[in-house]
Amino acid sequence: MTTEWLRDSLGGAGHRVTGPRLAVWSVVAGTPHLTAEEIAQVVRDTDPTVNLSSVYRSLSLFAELGLVRESSLDTGGPSHWELAHADEQFHMRCRSCGKVEHHHGDLVERVVGHLTNDHGFIVEQVDLLVTGLCSECSRSQSPSARPSRSR
């Protein structure tokens, strides 16, 4: 999603294209899964006049327009921001190195179907986070250091 696409999306919704909005968009599009504070720091590195409030306002507008989504990737931690994606993509976060990857499969679709068909629950949005060890970290840890899964 290019800055031209952002210009069209903002303009089409009656919003102005501003320097801070373009700067925030550039950071989110280039580096997903950052907190608002991290985004603000990267933006300030290129434009020190952009403050944290401008970053939050830009993220809020982008979320309202469905351009970005907010995800909770840490229990009790700050929200992380990324370009909007389908619910079928879920997050896998490595508890060792912190890397976050997206996975696309039919798991979310099956859960939504179950909740809708068996429980009458109307699903509006799914934000699934799976925490564990990425392939690199799991290879570097001894089997005895790996936690056992409880079911």
Image (tube, rainbow, N blue to C red):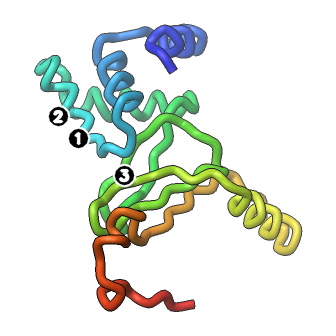
Amino acid identity at mark 2: Gln
Give the residue drawn at x 84%, y 68%.
120
Task: State the CA–CA distance, disc 1 to disc 3.
Answer: 11 Å
Q: Position of residue 12 (x, y in %)?
A: 60, 10
Task: State the CA–CA distance, disc 2 to disc 3.
Answer: 15 Å
Amino acid identity at mark 1: Glu
Query: Which residue position holds label 2?
Result: 41
- On the rendered structure, is 91 left or right of 145? right
How many other residues sit within 10 Å of disc 3, few (<14), some (14-19) or many (≥20)?
Answer: some
Q: Which mark is residue 79?
A: 3
Mark 2 residue element: helix
Q: Position of residue 96 (x, y in %)?
A: 28, 68
Task: State the CA–CA distance, disc 1 to disc 2.
Answer: 5 Å
- On the rendered structure, is 118 left or right of 52? right
Give the residue drawn at x 50%, y 56%.
91
Q: Position of residue 102 (x, y in %)?
A: 51, 50
Residue in the foreground of this view, choosing between 122 and 46: 46
Quick one: quadrant of the C terminus? Answer: bottom right
Q: Mark 3 or mark 1, which is nearer the start of the sequence?
A: 1
Query: Which residue position holds label 1?
Result: 38
Above or below: residue 147 compared with residue 22? below
Question: Dots 1 and 2: beta carbons under 8 Å?
Answer: yes
Question: Dots 1 and 3: beta carbons under 8 Å?
Answer: no
- On the rendered structure, is 23 left or right of 83? left
Q: Mark 3 or mark 2, which is nearer the start of the sequence?
A: 2
Give the residue drawn at x 43%, y 9%.
16
Residue in the foreground of this view, choosing between 117 and 106: 106
How many other residues sit within 10 Å of disc 1, few (<14), some (14-19) or many (≥20)?
Answer: some
Q: Position of residue 67 (x, y in %)?
A: 53, 29
Figure quadrant of residue 21: top left
